[in-house]
Amino acid sequence: MRRFSRRRFAGLLAGAAAALLALSACSAPAPTHPGLTSWGQVTAAAKGQTVRLWMYGGDEQGNAYVDKTLIPAAAKVGVTLQRVPVADTKDALNRVLTEIQAGTKDGSVDLVWVNGDNFGTGKQAGAWLCGWTSLLPNMSLTNPTDPLLTDDFGTPVQGCEAPWSKAQFTIAYNAATVTDPPHTLAGLLDWAQQHPGRFTYPAPPDFTGSAFTREVLDSVSGGYKNVPLRFDQKAFGRLTPALYGRLKALAPSLWRKGQTYPKTSTELNALYAGGQVDFTMTYGPAELTKLVADGTYPAATKVLTLQEGSLGNASFLAIPATSGHQAGAMVVANLALSPQQQAAKADPRTWGQFTVLDTARLDTAERDLFARLPQSPVVPDFNVLSKNANPELAAAWVPALDDAWRRLVLAGQ
């Protein structure tokens, strides 16, 4: 997922969840597609297959990249790739879980852009094919010990999804109105209280709003190292009073005095574009370049550099266990990992997504693909943006934090 914001699991259909928890007894990874033990066998089986990629449809740049760049490249290797837009990745997961319950062997979902709790929930329920990524030739171009690629919001990947993009939680501001920006998250909250009405954040469970809440949790806890990555109820009880106390104290200084919050990151972005607030935030900083260039965002938009760093994650491509075109899906996932596709996707004029490849593993010509990319006047290089990157908490933290925010901050209990 770019907008790892939109790929959240907000709850499965109750009936499907109850039935499928029985399937979750198969917590071990599912086997690789029977009979496919070499890349040659995969490519032979993939010829002529149609692969339906289900992905968040609200990202215009992401849609254009897939339609204009990835789909034609897949056609050249004999695979027809079709993009299926969804409002939320949980819609794709729910479809897969329903097809598992029905015993479907040739389902309607062949590949999913996914991360976080959607991946973790699906893995627990046996929704994903596992153990296949080692067959992909281009996996050798990634760092096998990169923590962003080995764990997905605390869930071990274990060959159940192939990496696609990296992301960094980013706060941006209008330098024309914020002339002395803060450089810590605690300083940002102080700034908001000193400038009433000029700051807000999306209401959880919006993914961006949830991520901001996790950023504040790390801050009030004295740093991310003091927050256990795995969810722990005792740690939740010990750490979150300071979190919600700080957010409740902040609320009266927010836009509209905290009596209402933007429902989505899109609404926050509109407030920023319209000059009603001086800050916005995103888990997809690539969008900032285009939004400034086309005049949507103020020309003086800059990225706020936090001394303690910010949250980082990766998004992936997963193959449902119910897909009847798993070989074709593997070919597309490998293609998406190629230096050519990763560089095209990293171009801010195309999509601007950060690569998951380890450039030290690339040859000179492949490194040059990235070296020739235009530098964004707004967004720093990933090496700068991800300095002091903080790990994401396990997915189980997310609904617990969101629910408590609604009770303690929004409802003011």
Image (cartoon, grey):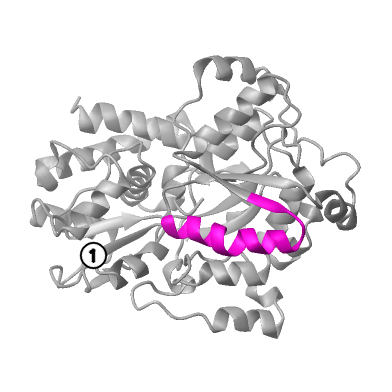
Q: Position of residue 291 (x, y in %)?
A: 31, 65
The secondary structure that dominates the magenta segment is: helix
> Label 1: few (<14), some or many (≥20) within 10 Å?
many
Which residue corresponds to the image point at 50% horizontal and 21% vertical from the top-left?
Answer: 13
Residue indicated by mark 1: 173
Span shown in magenta: 60-81
Left or right, 243 with respect to 255, comes to: right
Q: Position of residue 54 (x, y in %)?
A: 57, 43
Which residue corresponds to the image point at 76% horizontal and 28% vertical from the top-left?
Answer: 105
Q: Position of residue 124 (x, y in %)?
A: 64, 30
Left or right, 228 with respect to 130, comes to: left
Q: Is residue 108 visible?
A: yes
Left or right, 39 with respect to 304, comes to: right
Q: Is residue 226 magenta?
A: no
Q: Position of residue 112 (x, y in %)?
A: 60, 44
Q: Amino acid at mark 1?
A: Tyr
Residue 221 or 185: which is nearer the viewer?
Answer: 185
Name above or below for residue 114 compared with residue 103: below
